[in-house]
């Protein structure tokens, strides 16, 4: 880039950063004061992000509500929801917005030049010229509003962010996290809840909401980021011409102040709600939390990530193990929380006793003092450094563009110091420096300075309280009733009229000229090439090997799959324990702590897991496998195989103390995941009523598995012998030569050493005869309502359209986009106030509709039931139809890493999907017409007529509507 070609900007800094293969520039827009970071490289997955420093002054959630609201129409794009129109009709690889405690981001990504320009245009117009000033309805819909459908009815509160945060505040872990965060920074914006506290959100006035936007959404307070292979000069000149030149620089006071350290450690004790079925005993959370420097010191930040690994996260980590051994909790969690100006380090004991608070803190200090004095295990430090370095070099963020992740990382320094924009992009020299400093007592000094001799800390205890959720609901109900009673009749009538008006606004169809304003690609802009499947099948003796021949930059991605189809049904849940035990118990040569560190010091890690491959033609014909995944440099392949043999042949299954620790942790983590991902849990349960794939998944990872683990943990002394015997039996049943399939992603050079290693592994596998049995699923439609202490619902309806004789078609992918961003979006999210809604239709015939953090239950099921009617009456002109097609192709054409290409190829093999079928599906999508969508009404009706539902929700709501269910029970 040349300065003379972008005359509206001045160059502040220019650096080559080989760590991320980029040339990096920092520019300042002369007229407006906007900061612009440019990362030039060869990545076709282009990223744009505009962010603003948005420090909140209270817990009304104004920054969060604004993040939602500015994407509800703007000057040049005056639709009610251009964000949704973009999702429907863009080839984006990422499209979202995020609120943080001190900033709000609006990132987009796309590999298509024209599409990328369209996304930039809509997002810049949204943040600078939103319709929020003209339409108060946006604030009421996305934030909060009083709802009164009839003047004689009860007054209620509703709103998308309001319900989202009710869901967030329903999880004890999230309640604890927020209290920890707020407790450490009481005099700064971090001392309030940026997302919004549901009890405070209704205090936010429309005028305050607008004032927040006018104060902070100015280019002088903006951070603009461009990444990838594009004409950067053209993009910068376009931004100047269209937006930035319209502003003069102004002072914006948004700097994040530093919290002064405390004179003494702060203590907070509070309650969280549990359901009537959950225990009060050993159900508290104890936490010790310490502020550790600031995010401008990248080496220190990286060192604390390594300390988190070394002290708490790794199995057998000394601080975690000491707390477990002392009975301070059944699960010990650690975290180093960065992404803010002053990061902090937390140690949390879950399933703990409140009265152990002082002993918990004392033991932490004693153990840390001992470690600081005697020194940290050097192997653990080396493993932590190698683990982080491997991840940084690999730069594989799954479906998230790496340019997006770099663009988030830069804010850890850029937001707090304009002179340090690129600090968090340079890591390789830091890893080398830390390897040397580890020999010089650097990590021990950090423990002394920050974790021991530091009063800028808090002890937060969260205790269970039955009836708290119902009490809060009752208090809110009474408060709303009293407020309504205090109003004159005309004010009540106005609320009812406003409720009606908001619904009319939501029902109002978009004006054609507004729809036409959204720039869009044409069908001809989309290629007909489908994803490629990289399977080179071969055999090592009689073992199938799928070689995915791809360039991987010297990293081999190995998956060893062992067929478990002959494991008897009563042993299936024990496989869920087995996958969590392998690699986490002692072996012949290593303690489990040393084993984990040895692996991470010399490779990218070894993981055990259960995988289910569904047949694309038959939802009963599934392949269940226990998989061992490893990634390593090519030269490390012998090491990885040697460690796998060590684990499979010499793992000590009869250490009952260690076994109990693993099972207690599994129970704890399952509780957390079921609460945070209630939609996934509900879908899996509902689908398990009829699908072979979900039936198995439910037994190893769902509600049924949680109930199994809960029973074992609660009665461990009686159960431990049976568990050990069954784990040993499973080892003999599963890890057999005849059960093995190998999947390996690497180029020809990387493949060279594989065959001898596989033969060596097979030679040590079990050949002893053991009993086997084919599983015959016992399907039952249960239609369950699971009660929780939460305040929102997750409503799922599922079925299988192949049962009605229907075939899969690529048009079902288009229908998913139409439902998720049209019918369900409008009726479940916009009108219903739920935070999210999803749908899916698989090749096997399994399909579902589901809501997320939903205030409703029966209303949502009614929306689901009316879905076929909407589909049968679907109409769309060529432009509208093209939009849905492009949005569908966007999901198919997500850029893939070598690792993800290997995974896709493996799944295609076992699911019996060919490139020809993928090509056929793509052409069905590209050639789809409205009539093809209308024909799917009968497909969805077939699914929904099977009446298979599952709901996870509040005790009160499920009790109120229990006639919808065959069974009502507590989730936990």
Image (tube, rainbow, N blue to C red):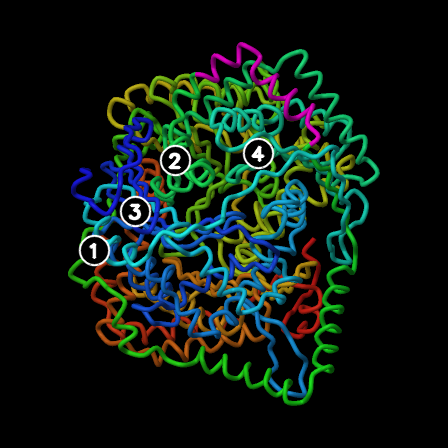
Q: Which tag, 4 or 1, sits closer to the chain's start?
A: 1
Label 4 to label 2, Cα distance in Å?
A: 22 Å
Q: Give SS at disc 3.
A: strand
Mark 4 or 2: the one toward you: 2
Instruction: Look at the numbered discs 2 and 1 and tell me whether their residues touch, using CB distance below 8 Å.
Output: no
Q: Is label 4 in contact with label 2 (beta carbons under 8 Å)?
A: no
Question: How many angstroms separate mark 1 from mark 3 (CA)?
Answer: 24 Å
Q: Earlier in the sequence, mark 3 or mark 2?
A: 3
Residue carrying label 1:
114
N-terminal of the pair, mark 4 or mark 2, is 4
Q: Nearer the viewer, residue 743 or 767?
A: 743
Mark 2–mark 1 Cα distance, whole angstroms, equals 29 Å
- Which quadrant of the figure has residue 217? bottom left
State the image coordinates of residue 834 (x, y, percent, origin top left). Answer: 53, 66
Residue, x 47% and y 43% (percent of image)? Answer: 624
Q: Which mark is residue 29?
A: 3
| Position of residue 616 measured from the top left corner of the image (x, y, whole percent) | 36, 54
Which residue lies under the disc numbered 4? 336
N-terminal label among 3 and 4: 3
What span is in magenta? 433-455
What separation in Å lies between label 3 and label 4 (alpha carbons)? 35 Å
Residue indicated by mark 2: 421
Instruction: Check disc 4 and report its element: helix, strand or loop.
Output: strand
């Amino acid at each position: 880039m040349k300065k003379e070609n972008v005359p509206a900007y001045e160059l502040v800094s220019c650096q080559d950063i080989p760590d991320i293969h980029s040339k990096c520039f920092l520019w300042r827009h002369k007229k407006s004061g906007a900061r612009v970071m440019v990362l030039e490289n060869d990545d076709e997955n282009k990223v744009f992000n505009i962010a603003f420093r948005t420090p909140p002054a209270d817990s009304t959630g104004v920054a969060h509500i604004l993040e939602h609201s500015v994407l509800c129409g703007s000057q040049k794009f005056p639709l009610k929801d251009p964000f949704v129109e973009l999702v429907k009709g863009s080839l984006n690889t990422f499209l979202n917005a995020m609120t943080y405690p001190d900033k709000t981001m609006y990132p987009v990504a796309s590999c298509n030049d024209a599409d990328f320009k369209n996304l930039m245009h809509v997002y810049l117009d949204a943040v600078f010229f939103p319709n929020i000033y003209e339409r108060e309805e946006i604030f009421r819909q996305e934030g909060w509003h009083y709802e009164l459908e009839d003047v004689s009815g009860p007054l209620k509160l509703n709103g998308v962010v309001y319900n989202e945060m009710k869901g967030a505040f329903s999880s004890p872990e999230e309640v604890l996290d927020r209290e920890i965060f707020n407790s450490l920074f009481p005099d700064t914006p971090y001392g309030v809840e940026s997302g919004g506290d549901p009890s405070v959100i209704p205090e936010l006035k429309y005028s305050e909401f607008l004032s927040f936007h006018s104060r902070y959404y100015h280019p002088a307070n903006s951070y603009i980021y461009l990444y990838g292979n594009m004409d950067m000069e053209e993009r910068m000149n376009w931004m100047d011409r269209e937006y930035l030149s319209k502003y003069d620089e102004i002072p914006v006071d948004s700097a994040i102040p530093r919290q002064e350290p405390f004179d003494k450690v702060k203590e907070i004790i509070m309650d969280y709600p549990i359901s009537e079925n959950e225990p009060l005993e050993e159900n508290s959370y104890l936490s010790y939390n310490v502020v550790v420097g600031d995010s401008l010191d990248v080496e220190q930040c990286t060192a604390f990530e390594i300390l988190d690994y070394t002290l708490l996260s790794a199995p057998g980590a000394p601080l975690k193990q000491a707390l477990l051994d002392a009975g301070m909790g059944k699960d010990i969690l650690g975290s180093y929380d960065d992404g803010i100006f002053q990061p902090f380090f937390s140690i949390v004991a879950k399933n703990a006793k409140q009265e152990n608070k002082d002993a918990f803190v004392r033991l932490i200090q004693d153990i840390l003092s001992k470690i600081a004095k005697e020194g940290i295990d050097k192997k653990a430090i080396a493993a932590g450094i190698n683990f982080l370095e491997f991840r940084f070099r690999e730069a594989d963020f799954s479906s998230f563009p790496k340019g997006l992740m770099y663009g988030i990382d830069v804010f850890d320094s850029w937001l707090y110091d304009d002179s340090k924009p690129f600090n968090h992009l340079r890591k390789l020299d830091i890893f080398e420096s830390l390897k040397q400093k580890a020999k010089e007592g650097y990590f021990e000094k950090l423990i002394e300075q920050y974790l021991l001799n530091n009063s800028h800390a808090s002890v937060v205890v969260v205790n269970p309280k039955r009836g708290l959720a119902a009490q809060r609901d009752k208090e809110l109900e009474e408060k709303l009733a009293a407020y309504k009673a205090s109003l004159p009749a005309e004010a009540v009538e106005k609320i009812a009229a406003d409720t009606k008006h908001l619904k009319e606004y939501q029902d109002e169809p978009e004006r054609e000229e507004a729809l036409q304003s959204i720039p869009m690609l044409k069908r001809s802009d989309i290629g007909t090439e489908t994803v490629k499947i990289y399977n080179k099948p071969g055999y090592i003796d009689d073992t199938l090997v799928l070689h995915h021949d791809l360039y991987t930059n010297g990293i081999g991605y190995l998956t060893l799959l062992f067929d478990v189809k002959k494991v008897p049904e009563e042993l299936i849940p024990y496989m869920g324990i087995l996958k969590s035990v392998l690699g986490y118990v002692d072996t012949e040569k290593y303690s489990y702590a040393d084993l984990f560190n040895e692996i991470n010091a010399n490779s990218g890690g070894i993981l055990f897991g259960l995988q289910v491959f569904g047949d694309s033609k038959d939802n009963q014909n599934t392949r269940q496998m226990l998989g061992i995944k490893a990634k390593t440099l090519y030269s490390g392949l012998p090491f990885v195989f040697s460690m796998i043999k060590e684990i499979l042949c010499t793992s000590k299954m009869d250490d009952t103390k260690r076994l109990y620790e693993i099972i207690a942790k599994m129970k704890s983590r399952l509780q957390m995941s079921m609460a945070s991902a209630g939609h996934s849990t509900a879908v899996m349960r509902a689908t398990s009523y009829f699908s072979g794939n979900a039936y198995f998944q439910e037994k190893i990872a769902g509600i049924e598995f949680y109930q199994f683990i809960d029973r074992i943990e609660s009665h461990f002394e009686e159960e431990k012998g049976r568990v050990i015997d069954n784990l040993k039996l499973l080892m003999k049943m599963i890890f057999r030569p005849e059960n093995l399939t190998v999947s390996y992603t690497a180029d020809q050079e990387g493949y060279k050493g594989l065959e001898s290693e596989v033969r060596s592994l097979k030679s040590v596998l079990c050949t002893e005869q053991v009993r086997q049995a084919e599983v015959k699923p016992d399907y039952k439609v249960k239609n369950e309502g699971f009660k929780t202490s939460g305040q929102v619902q997750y409503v799922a309806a599922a079925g299988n359209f192949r049962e009605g004789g229907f075939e899969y078609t690529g048009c079902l992918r288009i229908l998913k986009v139409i439902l998720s961003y049209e019918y369900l979006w409008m009726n479940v999210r916009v009108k219903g106030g739920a935070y999210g809604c999803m749908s899916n239709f698989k090749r096997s015939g399994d399909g579902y509709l589901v809501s997320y953090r939903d205030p409703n239950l029966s209303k949502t099921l009614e929306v689901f039931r009316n879905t076929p009617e909407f589909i049968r009456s679907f109409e769309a002109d060529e432009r509208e139809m093209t939009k849905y097609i492009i949005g569908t192709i966007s999901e198919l054409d997500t850029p893939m890493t070598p690792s993800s290409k290997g995974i896709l190829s493996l799944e295609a093999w076992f699911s019996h999907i060919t490139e020809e079928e993928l090509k056929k599906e793509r052409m069905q999508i590209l050639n789809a017409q409205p009539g093809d969508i209308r024909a799917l009404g009968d497909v969805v009706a077939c699914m929904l007529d099977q009446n298979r539902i599952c709901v996870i929700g509040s005790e009160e709501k499920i009790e109120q509507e229990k006639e919808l269910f065959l069974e009502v029970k507590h989730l936990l």
